[in-house]
């Protein structure tokens, strides 16, 4: 997928490298179930300020102004909700209307050389239930569609036969590299591996390589990562992965990152994210090389034999949770405890004590109960 050569407001704003593909989508990945329902002109989404609605016209305008390389179309799909019979009738019609609006908006752009590639959504429902939408895609809209987005693996079968050569972007929930390889085998080309960020938040350092593990154990499958919260790493001065040439492994060791995790320093998760992104980039580079050599099927089988099926569980606590990661149910306890709290009877003593003067010394502050001298 080529990167556009024109100026992009979004690329400039986030300082993204010129060589990196810039993708604009209507929802975060994986999406957060929204309380509101979609309408004929909008979808319900999660934003940094809470739940909101995204109007189709606003999304078209954003695509025109921000100029990404790839635009993922809006789909009348509600995460983790099973559509009823009446809802199924609307899904194809709404998605078609939004797709036509985006295509028309991109066609109206004067700069024909740097138009974003538009990926049309494939709905996670039966082909017959979206037959009119699919007919329009392969006839009137076929020349304007550059690829597809899928929400479930079964949606791959619904792609029209005359458009099966186009790239597919998976918006499915990925639990680890095994899911990626399984979907590549089915014909998926692009992924949003959110498990990388989840692993970082959990203090897990990814260690897998494709197609074979560099250090094989005797008959046992190897873990996909290392839990740096475990006490064994407290004094371990080895890099996360000896052969890794990322910034983290070249400059820091496991004991240092373990210390940062224990101290709740955000640098811990920054260094972990640098390493984990390096691992997943090397993974995809090796997959592309394997496909080019024609050995992907054999390499896929080898990876399945070498590695465990799931990422290791975390034994520690991640960084402060974001708003969309915390359930809002009534009566639920905090997911993370308070970082600071009043000790013993300090609150009452401070309320009764007179405030010290600006020129008060340490003895005066200690007598009034605002501090305590350590031995």
Image: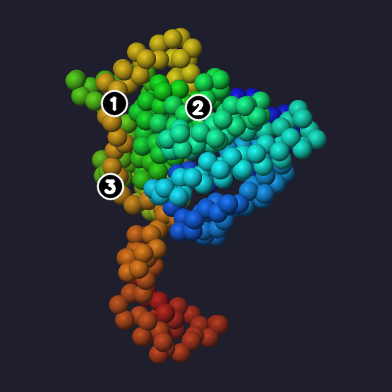
Q: CA distance from mark 3 to mark 1?
A: 20 Å
Whether 288 is drawn above or below 236: the answer is: above
Place of residue 17 in the rendered image (x, y in percent of width and height, measured from the top left):
63, 34
Place of residue 332 in the rendered image (x, y in percent of width and height, measured from the top left):
32, 65
Does any portion of residue 196 appear in the rendered image?
no
Q: Secondary structure at mark 1?
A: loop
Mark 2 neighbour class, 10 Å CA radius: few under 14, some 14 to 19, many 20 or more: many
Q: Secondary structure at mark 3?
A: loop
Q: Secondary structure at mark 2?
A: loop
Q: Which badge, 1 or 2, comes first in the chain's sequence?
A: 2
- Say whether residue 43 is left or right of residue 220: right
Q: Which residue is mark 1?
A: 307
Instruction: Indicate which label's residue lies in the foreground, 2 or 3.
Output: 2
Contact flag, marks 3 and 1 (Cβ < 8 Å): no
Mark identifier at residue 315: 3
Q: Quadrant of residue 224?
A: top left
Whether 324 is drawn above or below 224: the answer is: below
Q: Residue at x 28, y 31 (%)?
A: 309
Instruction: Indicate which label's residue lies in the foreground, 3 or 1.
Output: 1
Q: Residue at x 45, y 32 (%)?
A: 127
Q: Residue furthest top?
A: 293
Tell which of 20 and 369 is nearer to you. Answer: 20
Tell which of 274 and 92 is nearer to you. Answer: 92
Q: Which residue is mark 2?
A: 159
Q: Which badge, 2 or 3, comes first in the chain's sequence?
A: 2
Q: Residue at x 70, y 46 (%)?
A: 61
- Give the quadrant of the N terminus: top right
Instruction: Indicate which label's residue lies in the foreground, 1 or 2.
Output: 2
Q: Which badge, 3 or 1, comes first in the chain's sequence?
A: 1
Q: Coloring scheme of the render? A: rainbow
């Amino acid at each position: 997928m080529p990167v556009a050569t024109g100026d992009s407001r979004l690329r400039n704003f986030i300082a993204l490298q010129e060589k990196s593909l810039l993708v604009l989508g209507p929802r975060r990945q994986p999406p957060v179930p929204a309380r509101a329902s979609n309408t004929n002109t909008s979808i319900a989404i999660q934003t940094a300020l809470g739940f909101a609605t995204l109007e189709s016209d606003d999304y078209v305008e954003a695509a025109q102004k921000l100029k990404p390389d790839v635009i993922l179309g809006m789909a009348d799909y509600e995460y983790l909700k099973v559509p009823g019979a009446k809802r199924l009738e609307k899904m194809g019609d709404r998605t078609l209307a939004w797709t036509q609006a985006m295509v028309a908006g991109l066609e109206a752009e004067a700069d024909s050389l740097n138009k974003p590639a538009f990926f049309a959504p494939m709905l996670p429902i039966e082909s017959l239930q979206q037959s009119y939408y699919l007919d329009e895609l392969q006839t009137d809209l076929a020349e304007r569609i550059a690829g597809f987005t899928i929400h479930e693996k079964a949606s791959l079968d619904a792609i029209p036969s005359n458009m099966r050569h186009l790239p597919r972007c998976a918006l499915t929930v990925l639990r680890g590299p095994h899911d990626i390889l399984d979907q590549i085998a089915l014909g998926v080309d692009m992924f949003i591996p959110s498990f990388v960020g989840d692993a970082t938040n959990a203090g897990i350092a990814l260690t897998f390589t494709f197609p074979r593990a560099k250090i094989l154990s005797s008959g046992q499958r190897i873990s996909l990562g290392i839990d740096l919260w475990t006490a064994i790493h407290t004094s371990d001065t080895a890099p996360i992965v000896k052969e890794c040439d990322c910034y983290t492994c070249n400059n820091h060791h496991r004991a240092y990152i373990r210390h940062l995790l224990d101290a709740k320093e955000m640098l811990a998760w920054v260094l972990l994210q640098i390493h984990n992104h390096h691992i997943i980039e090397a993974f995809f580079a090796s997959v592309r090389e394997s496909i080019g050599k024609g050995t992907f099927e054999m390499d896929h089988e080898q990876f399945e034999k070498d590695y465990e099926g799931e990422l290791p569980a975390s034994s520690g606590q991640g960084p402060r949770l974001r708003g969309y990661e915390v359930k809002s149910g009534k009566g639920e306890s905090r997911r993370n405890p308070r970082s600071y709290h009043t000790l013993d009877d300090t609150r009452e003593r401070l309320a009764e004590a007179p405030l010290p003067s600006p020129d008060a010394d340490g003895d005066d502050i200690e007598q009034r109960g605002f501090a305590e001298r350590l031995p």
